[in-house]
Amino acid sequence: MRKVAEIGIESLTPSAIGGYDPNKHDDILRGTSIRGLAAWWLRAIVSGKAYDGGDLQYREKAINVQKEVFGSTDKSSLLTVVQEVQSMKGINPSFLKRNGGIDHIRLKLLLMGKKDEDTLLKKMLRIFRGTVKVYSSAKLESHMDAAMLGLHAIVLSLLSEGIGKGSRRGLGAVKVSQVTLPDEVRRFLQSNGYNGLLSLGQDSEVVLKNVIDDALKLAGKALKEASGKRSGRSLPEIPSLSMRTAEVYVKKMNLGGTPEERLIRLNTTLKKLFLRSMAPSGSLPDILQKTKPCQKKTKKGKIIRVSEATALGSYILGLPRAASSPPTSHEYMVKFRTGNTQSCSTSRVKLSRSTKNQYSGFIGFRNGAYEHYRRASPLIVSLLDERTIVVSFFKSSDWQDELQWFTSHQKTVTAQSVTDAYNIVSNYLRHNFIKVWP
């Protein structure tokens, strides 16, 4: 194994280590967690570069590069990620609860239905300092471009997104304190003008922009000639770090001196960006409330109230997991086009009381039964350092054909409606954050 880099990291906000299951928590940080996160960002990097080049096969090529760098079930990985933890401690649950920390949108879901919140918070949340070691299974001299692409994906994922549960909502944010590189790697970066990893110590937003630009340059080397020409007006099918469809913003603010304080203060920003589906009133975030007119005319000429108009557009912030409670006025039902006459119908499907009592999230009607459906938010929020919030925004077309509002209205999802909804989000971000890329 050849050493590629050592990355020093430390907690900016508490981490809930583990997978999606809210009842299972890890006491240690595993290298597989970081590799999985980096693989997602690598796909976004490569697909974004190919998409901007007009390549019709941007999705397939991104997956192939990901398999080459991080492996798959039938292919060994070029890079191996090993995590070493130097220190780890729990959090102060009383401080978090006393100051509203458990109102964090993700913590609310993790604590839902739990009686002993203090014990669970102590068990679940961790603050740590450690090192991420990256190794190559092949000689660097013959695989340097691919290894550097993977390394940049790892660093970018740590800069832009947290580790563990709720990592897209500010939990598990880490600071990249240093990147130690072997002489061979450092010379390669310097001679080819890749300055992102060498600029640590400068303003964090400058480092972030440089790492993104370098990652896209490296992705260009991994891609062969474009396969056909893509229409310039279509959205990518997957979240892609494209100069046309992705945006990265930052915001400087006083976030406090401890990970717990930062999470509490960050939550104020999160409430403005994400659906507060747990709120009794089903209230909508500022990102929608401040960008919609007071009334809206439907295709049939009917005027609907502002609360209904904003709710009809709220799907763009993601379709969260269903919860076992009665639906609020701001919930949707997903309608799949699978050949089933009921699911393809444009008329509203009447939900039985038992179904309404079972779901308050987003559900799909498929093959005669309601199924859970989830679509992640296009927004990822984390911290770059102790004073800088970072927001990554991805526009893509991977939405279901039709969404149905539980109350009275239906939302047909088209490329234009998705673009219009994305533009509302972009407009809010431009007015409230500083754009650093592209």
Image (cartoon, grey):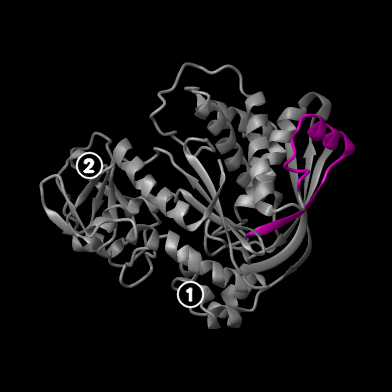
Question: In the rendered image, which quarter contains the N terminus?
Answer: top right
Question: In the rendered image, which quarter contains the C terminus?
Answer: top right
Asked if the stretch drawn in magenta spans residue 404, the answer is no
* Residue appearing at x 28%, y 57% in the figure: 310
What's the mark number on residue 76? none
* Residue appearing at x 68%, y 73% in the figure: 257
Could you tell me if residue 70 is visible in this image? Answer: no
* Residue appearing at x 65%, y 74% in the figure: 91
Q: Which residue in the structure is indicated by mark 1?
A: 114
Q: Amino acid at mark 1?
A: Lys
Provide the residue span drawn in magenta: 173-199
Specify the farthest residue to the left. Answer: 301
Q: Residues within 10 Å of mark 1 (few under 14, many from 20)?
A: few
* Residue appearing at x 76%, y 50% in the figure: 200
In the figure, 255 relative to 240: above or below?
A: below
In the image, residue 172 lies at what x, y percent? Answer: 62, 61
Specify the farthest residue to the right. Answer: 183
Disc on the earlier residue, 1 or 2: 1
In the figure, 121 relative to 166: above or below?
A: below
In the image, residue 400 lies at what x, y percent? Answer: 33, 41
Asked if the stretch drawn in magenta spans residue 176, the answer is yes
Q: Residues within 10 Å of mark 2 (few under 14, many from 20)?
A: many
Question: Where on the picture, by quarter, is residue 341?
Answer: top left
Question: Where on the picture, by quarter, is residue 195?
Answer: top right
In the figure, 282 relative to 383: above or below?
A: below
Q: Which residue in the structure is indicated by mark 2?
A: 343
Compute the Cα span from label 1 to label 2.
36 Å
Residue 366 shown left or right of residue 408 in the figure: right
Q: Amino acid at mark 2?
A: Ser
Please, what secondary structure does the residue beneath circle 2 have?
helix
Residue nearer the viewer, 404 or 200: 200
